[in-house]
Structure formats: C-alpha cells, structure tokens
Image (cartoon, rainbow, N blue to C red):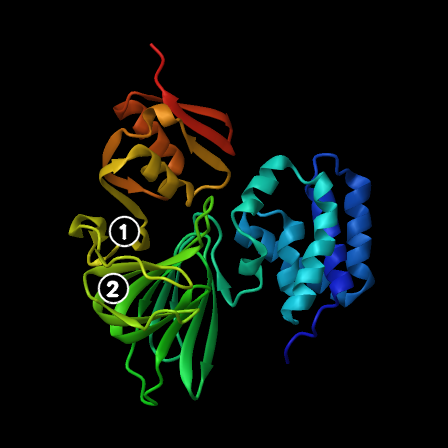
Amino acid sequence: MPSPTLEPAVIRQAAQWLVRLHADSADAQEHAACARWRAADPAHEQAWQKAERLARQFGAVPPALGVPVLTRKTAAVQRRALLQTLAVLGVVAPAAWLGWRQAPWQGWAADYATATGERRHLDLPDGSRLALNTASAVDLDWNPRQRLVHLRRGEILVQTAPDPLQRPFLVATPQGRLRALGTRFTVRLHEAVGDGDASTTLQVLEHRVEVTPAMGFEPPQIVSAGQGLGFTASTFGPLQPNPDEASLAAGEPGWTQGVLYADGMRLDDFLAELARYRPGVLRCDPAVAGLRISGAYQLGDTDQVLRMLAATLPVAVVQRTRWWVMVSPLQA
C-alpha cells in the first residue's frame, strides 16, 4: 500500500527540526524535543525519515530546502512549501547556502535528479538508457502517444531503443523540442549570462536528431552524427563539429566515465567546467584566464585537480574556505 501523502505543515516542521539539529548550537534538549515530536505522530516520523534521506542524497543542500520534494502534490504547492521553508534559512551556515545555490528547487520536484558532483544512469521503461550529469534533473512522460523526457536542469546522455508502438522519443527543454531519429546524443542546458539568452546545446553521437525551437520562428533542423547545435527559444546557432575524439571515453562523453578532458583548453573555460562538479564558488583571475591546459582529469576529486593545476601551471590556488576558491597568478 502506498504511503499517505504528507501534509505541507508536517514537511515544514521536519525542515525546521533538521535545520535546528544541524546548527552548531543544537543541544541535548533540542534533540530530545525533536525525538518527542517524531514520536507524537507516525506522519512526523515518516517526514523525518524522508527528510534525512534527502539530506544524505543532496549532501551540501540544506535539509530545509530539500524537504518540499517529500510531497508529490502540484508544483504550486511545492513552490509554496519551498518559499515557507526558506524562512528558516537565517540559521543555515553560509557554506550550506552556497551548496544549495547550485541545485535549485526544480531538481527537488523532478522525477530523477543528481546533486552537484553526482552522476546517475537510468534504464527507461522502453529499454532506452539515460545518464544524468552533475546537478541535473528530468521528468518522464510515457504515454500511448509519445516517450518524453523533460530536461529541467543540467545535462543528459540519451541512448534510445526501438519502440514496438512506434512512439516518438522526445526531449523537451525551455528552448525547444528534440526528436530522436534512432540515435544517441547529449543535451545540455545553459543559463542566461549577462544580456544573453538561456540556451540548449545538442551533440549527436549516432544517427540524427530533429530540433524545433520553442517559439517556432525557424523550421526544424536535422543534426547528424558528429555535429553539435546550440539554440535559443527563437534562433539556431551554427552547426559545429563535436569535440575531438580524445574527449570521448569508449565512445561516450568523458563525464559519463567521471573524466574531464582538456586539449589546449583555456584555463578559465576549464575551471568553469570543473566548477559544475564541486559545491561553492570557483573563480579564475583574468590574469591567468588565457593559460592553456591539456590532459584527463578525474572528476571524483576536484581538490586533487586543483592541486595538479598548482603543480603544473604558474598559478596559486587560494582557498578561503571549502566553498570559495580562486585560481590566481603565482607570486614571485
């Protein structure tokens, strides 16, 4: 029998208890009071257990912010629960806020999500396969007419399987819709920077993908294997060749194997990619931004990658806290 839906009020209470007990000032009396609250109602204990699981799943994400996903009610209810939960952020450490900043609420309400630095592989209902990169989130909509993946955040690798019902395999992003033509491909969302628009990047590894922008100002475009395409809701960018084969591991994007490849990459671009896999802020001083870097770097230990940079380039890694790092020129 499925568990009963948790009431938003109970979720908020669980959030508040998690924040209080994770604070440095929590004492034995507060722990005892939380234990009494959990014992007072089975729903309290259910909310607490789910909240703790979420806290472990998202790691640096403040527990209070993860709690709205405990209910599967409408998005409007989830948004209200999130906004009410934000009221307790005054007692959350700044480091926790920096960790949360990289995993916004869209991910918590999604069917499947990854935290910063996490990767996940899924077998879909039709036999297709889906890989989620760091800080990514998707919803699935399987019905008699279509197989639809909503990419809410981050980056995915899709490997489609034949469908006996001949349903199209679609990936939807805020910028448009992609239709697989018997293929394997990656899709990545990019947030708007400065005056630019948010965008989606497609890279086709096998066969072809048809792309239709959300606003429909341009006709659909076919992208073939070995090609990449960036697009906004209204315009296509130019077709580009996919990265050199050296950036693939056994025919897969390096990130699926936990590797970041660089071949003469600018240091600022390299650090921007590395920052996707670690919580907090990672910055590059403009004075060293143009340095070039090559190699294969393990994403499972980004601190070790930074140490390697300091050992091989004329740079210093200035680490104020675990959550704030600057790569600067090496001082004589």
Image quadrant where residue 128 sits: bottom left
**Most extreme residue toward the left, as rendered?**
245
Q: Residue at x 42, y 87 (%)?
A: 145
**Image height of 80 relative to 244, above or below:** below
Quadrant of image for the C terminus: top left
Q: Residue at x 27, y 24 (%)?
A: 313
Q: Is residue 39 visible to us here?
A: yes
Quadrant of image for the N terminus: bottom right
**Most extreme residue toward the top, as rendered?**
332
Q: Residue at x 82, y 54 (%)?
A: 36
Q: Which residue is mark 2?
A: 204
**Image height of 8 relative to 134, above or below:** below
Q: Amino acid at mark 1?
A: Gly
| 263, 99: nearer the viewer | 263
Q: Which residue is mark 1?
A: 254
Answer with mark 1 or mark 2, whichever residue precedes in sequence: 2
Between the residue at mark 1 and the residue at mark 2, the CA separation in whole angstroms equals 15 Å
Residue 31 is situated, as x and y percent measured from the top left of the image, at: 77, 45
Residue 195 is situated, as x and y percent measured from the top left of the image, at: 46, 46
Whether tag 1 and tag 2 are in contact, CB under 8 A, the answer is: no
Q: Amino acid at mark 2?
A: Val
Tag 1: Cα neighbours inside 10 Å, few (<14), some, or many (≥20)?
some
Q: Assign a secondary structure to mark 2.
A: strand
